[in-house]
Amino acid sequence: MLSPLHQSALQSPTAIALIAKGRGTSYRSLSQQVLALGEQLLEQGMQPGDRLACIASNCAEMLKLYWVCVDHGWVFCPLSPKYPDSQLSVLLQRFAIHYLWCPDDTREQLWQQRHRLQPDFTLAKSYNVPEISIDMPVNIILTSGSSGVPKAALHSLRGHIANAEGSLRLITLQVSDGWLASLPMFHIGGLAIINRCALAAATVIIPDNDLTLAQQLKRDPISHLSLVATQLQQLLDEAPTSLVLIKYLLLGGGAISQSLLDRMQSMDMQVLTSYGMTEMGSQITTGPARSDGSSGKLLPKRELTIRDGVIWVKGETLFLGYLQDDGTVDKATDADGWFCSKDLGYWDATGLLHIQGRADNMFICGGENIQPEEVETALKLHSDIIEAVVFPMTDAKFGSLPAAVVKTRSGQLPDAEEIKRFLSQHIAAFKRPRQYYLWPVDEQLGLKVQRRQIIAKVTTTPAQ
């Protein structure tokens, strides 16, 4: 078969595949640019099975490199540009990545032992479109999971297509639609946007760093948007009219407050939330955003079962496994092909999935189990609290006591007595945090909160 990019170029050649800096590129043109790029990388020595690291934020060049890897059986390895050179060098060595592309000319240390590719991304030529095997490894996404040590999750194009097809059963995406690539391609959610758009011949819109989000929403034809609740809150506060053309809003980052949902009722868009993971290629369940924190119903091509409160998954979207340092692949499944997510959850009476947190985040306070995510959900119901991370503090009497890091709209910690009264309406007394810390000023909110990093930063400063 042909890759989804080239297939859409044949079926919808004049449809806009990509918008970057306000300029559009048709599927025919993008297809020809990817074909020309492939010829250049072949001339520079790349062979089937080679791994290509891309160290950059989302850009048109990264999107082209992904599709050229699909064409030639290379493994696309997007890495965060926030990683220091020392960490990147270790990752490149661990996973035997010998080719890399990076627009940052200051990373001289990385060029010394790897082949830096510097192709001309603007070339376009009508080469023969290669046929591909959709079962071969096509990309690596790093995921730290619960260990904190990065694992390399290996995916096939078949898995990506299955994930996108299941998602598109619920989220309609047409040729005239555009999805803002607001999630980085080195996270599975970012790569999922690229695949969904290619399958539907829709437009991938690259974030413009010269504009605010509100400004780009007004300039570019963005109909589909992935955000966390805090970004949505900011848009509603500062530029609510920027959302008028949005058809589908996919929210991540946990529970959504009822006050935020109430503000969305008058808008003509579908607001959805989902549960997903790197190992399943992104979305697993999806449904209308609700204040009870539910994550919707199971999408097609996925299976999900709950054993002793822990979620296990499998299906057509499941990854190939974790790439090991010796080049082998660990499927990480049981004898029946089920993958343990280590997430806790349950189905409610209406068939909606509720996520209760990570099994390995739970701690014991005076003989009672505390699930941090439950406490975080309760805290975020407070009108001033945007985000929260709950963690155990060592205590001589109780073993551990809950503490919380909070990001507030006011920029101040909540009043101790007022927050105590508020939480008494939602959670048991032993679950209430005993200490509060303000969110580190240099920690930006993303789709996934970096718990360990935030906890480490605040515990080196005095609590308030």
Image (cartoon, grey):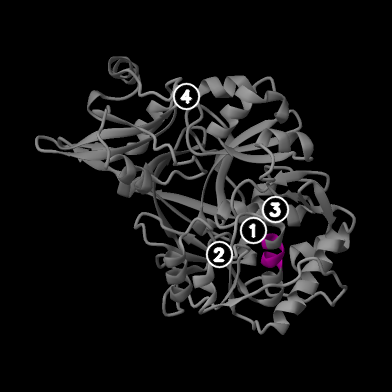
The percent position of residue 98, horizontal first and vertical second, equals 55, 78
Residue appearing at x 33%, y 21% in the figure: 423
Q: Are marks 4 and 2 in contact (CB under 8 Å)?
A: no
- Asked if residue 8 is positioned above or below residue 252 in the image, the reply reads below
The residue singled out by tag 1 in the image is: 162
- Magenta portion: prevailing SS class: helix
- Note whether residue 336 is visible: no
State left or right for residue 351 relative to residue 128.
Answer: left
Numbered mark located on residue 65 in the image: none
Question: Looking at the image, is mark 1 or mark 3 earlier in the sequence?
Answer: 1
What amino acid type should be assigned to the residue bearing mark 1? Answer: Ala
Question: Does 63 lie within the magenta span?
Answer: yes
Question: Looking at the image, is mark 4 or mark 3 earlier in the sequence?
Answer: 3
What amino acid type should be assigned to the residue bearing mark 3? Answer: Arg
The percent position of residue 263, horizontal first and vertical second, equals 61, 20
Which of the two residues, 301 or 293, is positioned nearer the viewer here? 293
Q: CA distance from mark 1 to mark 3?
A: 10 Å
The residue singled out by tag 3 in the image is: 196
The residue singled out by tag 4 in the image is: 409
Magenta residues, as a range?
62-67
Q: Residue furthest right?
A: 14
> Is label 1 or label 3 in front?
3
Q: CA distance from mark 1 to mark 4?
A: 40 Å
